[in-house]
Image (tube, helix red, strand yellow):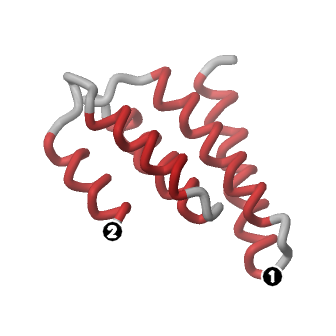
């Protein structure tokens, strides 16, 4: 799947998750996990030093937290911290998201 398709999918998934969350539907957690998974795929498609790569990495971690899956958020952040190309600004942003 190319990045344009992934961007479309993640936009739709974010909208769906926000709608479910706003209505108090318990399926919102699953929808946020879907967002995290798609963002993770986007993160794999772009280097950490790329703007889109940073956005996807932050999105994957943030969505995992919104899903209530702190273990996944921590695992993703640890993976992204370990990337050689990850700028310090991305690492700081990820730490702030995890706080």
**Looking at the rendering, which quadrant does residue 38 occupy?**
top right
Q: Which mark is residue 99?
A: 2
Residue 72 versus residue 91: which sits nearer the camera?
Answer: 72
Residue 27's spot in the image, x, y percent? 84, 65
Dot 2 lies on which element?
A: loop
Dot 1 lies on which element?
A: loop
Q: Which residue is mark 1?
A: 24
Residue 82 versus residue 14: which sits nearer the camera?
Answer: 82
Residue 68's spot in the image, x, y percent? 62, 64
Q: Residue furthest top?
A: 1
Horizontal side, residue 84 vs residue 41: left or right: left
Residue 28's spot in the image, x, y percent? 77, 66
State the quadrant of the C terminus: bottom left
Residue 47's spot in the image, x, y percent? 34, 23
Which of the two discs, 1 and 2, labels the residue nearer the N terminus?
1
Badge 1, how many Cα within 10 Å: few under 14, some, many 20+?
Answer: few
**Looking at the rendering, which quadrant does residue 15 occupy?**
bottom right
Q: Which residue is located at x 57 percent, y 54 percent?
A: 64
Q: Which residue is located at x 17 percent, y 48 percent?
A: 89
Q: Which mark is residue 61?
A: none
Q: Disc 1 versus disc 2: distance between alpha carbons? A: 24 Å
């Amino acid at each position: 799947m190319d990045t344009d398709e992934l961007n479309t999918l993640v936009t739709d998934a974010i909208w769906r998750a926000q709608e479910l969350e706003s209505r108090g539907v318990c399926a919102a957690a699953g929808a946020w996990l879907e967002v995290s998974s798609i963002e993770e795929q986007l993160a794999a498609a772009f280097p950490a030093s790329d703007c889109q790569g940073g956005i996807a990495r932050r999105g994957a971690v943030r969505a995992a937290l919104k899903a209530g899956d702190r273990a996944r958020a921590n695992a993703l952040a640890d993976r992204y911290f370990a990337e050689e190309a990850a700028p310090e600004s991305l690492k700081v942003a990820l730490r702030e998201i995890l706080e």
